[in-house]
Image (tube, helix red, strand yellow):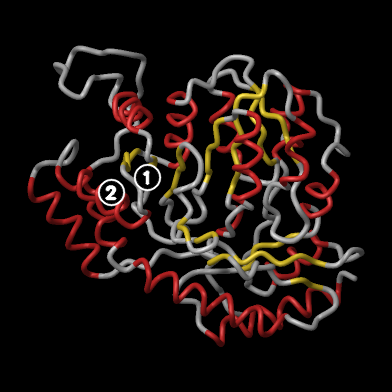
Amino acid sequence: MRRIALAAPEIDESDIQAVVEVLRSGRLALGPKAEEFERLIAEYVGVRHAVAVSSGTAALHLIVRALGIGHGDEVLVPSFTFAATVNALLYEGAVPVFVDIEPETYNIDPQGLEKRITPRTKAIMAVDVFGHPAEWDAILEIARRHGLKVIDDSCEAIGAEYKGKKVGRFGDAAAFAFYPNKQITTGEGGVIVTDEDEVARLCRSMRNQGRGEMGAWLEHERLGYNYRIDEMSAALGVSQLKRIEKFLAKREQVARWYTERLEGLDWVRPPVVKPYVRMSWFVYVVTLAEGVDRDGVMRALEEQGVPCRAYFSPIHLQPYIRERFGFRGGELLVTENVARRTIALPFHNNLRLDEVEYIVEALKRAVTRNM
């Protein structure tokens, strides 16, 4: 029986050398590599500012604070996402107002947004789920009509494009993340991208314990956090970013291998990619047909040496959110239905064709046993 990795970063000798050079320099924090990483990210995305931080969660949190979203403010957000999306709002006492997803790409459904707007609504936080851009034209038009701030949680989607424009350029600010299973990695790390000078200024201050740009080390202008990225992580990010297009192409090839082998099977649906977007493949998530025992399929895959995950478990049904807001299930019909049927299969840059074929055959056997 094979053992296949669920995810894996691509680290080469240039990455290792970049980190070693920082270690030998003795400058391990607040140094030139973080500044270089920010400059290169801003250039790649096409924005004025990039602010590197310790995680994607930190990036989202600082954006929320910089936009003045606080206690009692409502923010429209999907439930079909990672917990950090919602946690960034809860940190500031804001209220997540969950909006259902559309049934093809699993991004937030623009048709559901306006129904959820109230006088307390302050912002929309959309997520580019699994690396597929949200419907940005519709989202931005709704936000414009209602005077709402817009946050792009693009932590899963660096390099993705919507109608020829890179994600990270939509709304007031966006966040990327660089955990080891992402398209590029810094180990742990994230970045805020924005064209808004004031948002960038506030985020730079708050990530550094609230210090001003020109203030003394022990002078603090506002409440802040230790959300800085270290120099080793930034150096790895610089090295990885040089190869991002190669990485995205490799991930596209792996996704194509999967899709070619799954198309036409009536018990599974490969991911849907709209013709006007560039997908930046974060994970490869399939949707099983109604009536297939998803959890049984996952157990059968694991027994064959194929790791997998249930992506995503809806946030509004997580225990801490149920307890706080009283959700019982049945509030978001598409989200809840999809979440019962989705599986993330092994996916990374260097997954081989023979491994993909083994995984697909294992999936066929697993489904046959659980229909």
Residue 158, quarter of the rendered image: bottom left
- Amino acid, disc 1: Gly
Residue 78, quarter of the rendered image: top right
Picture quarter with the C terminus: bottom right
Residue ID for mark 2:
233
User: Circles 2 and 1: CB distance less than 8 Å?
Assistant: yes
In the displayed structure image, the side of residue 287 where residue 4 appears, left or right: left
Residue at the far left in the pictured view: 25
Give the residue at x 25% y 61%. 239
Q: Position of residue 193 (x, y in %)?
A: 38, 43
Give the residue at x 63% y 72%. 305
Residue 238, quarter of the rendered image: bottom left
- Amino acid, disc 2: Ser
Residue ID for mark 1:
189
Give the residue at x 47% y 58%. 165
User: Could you tell me which secondary element the residue under label 2 belongs to?
Assistant: helix
Q: Position of residue 334 (x, y in %)?
A: 82, 50
Q: Position of residue 369 (x, y in %)?
A: 86, 74
How many neighbours does mark 1 have within 10 angstroms: few (below 14), some (14-19), or many (20 or more)?
Answer: many
Q: Position of residue 231 (x, y in %)?
A: 21, 44
Disc number for residue 240: none
In the displayed structure image, the side of residue 252 where residue 309 appears, left or right: right
Give the residue at x 70% y 41%. 79
In the displayed structure image, the side of residue 232 where residue 118 appears, left or right: right
Q: Is residue 128 above or below residue 31?
A: below
Q: In front: 362, or 126?
A: 126
Residue at the far front in the pictured view: 145
Picture quarter with the N terminus: bottom right
User: Could you tell me which secondary element the residue under label 1 belongs to?
Assistant: loop
How many neighbours does mark 2 have within 10 angstroms: few (below 14), some (14-19), or many (20 or more)?
Answer: many
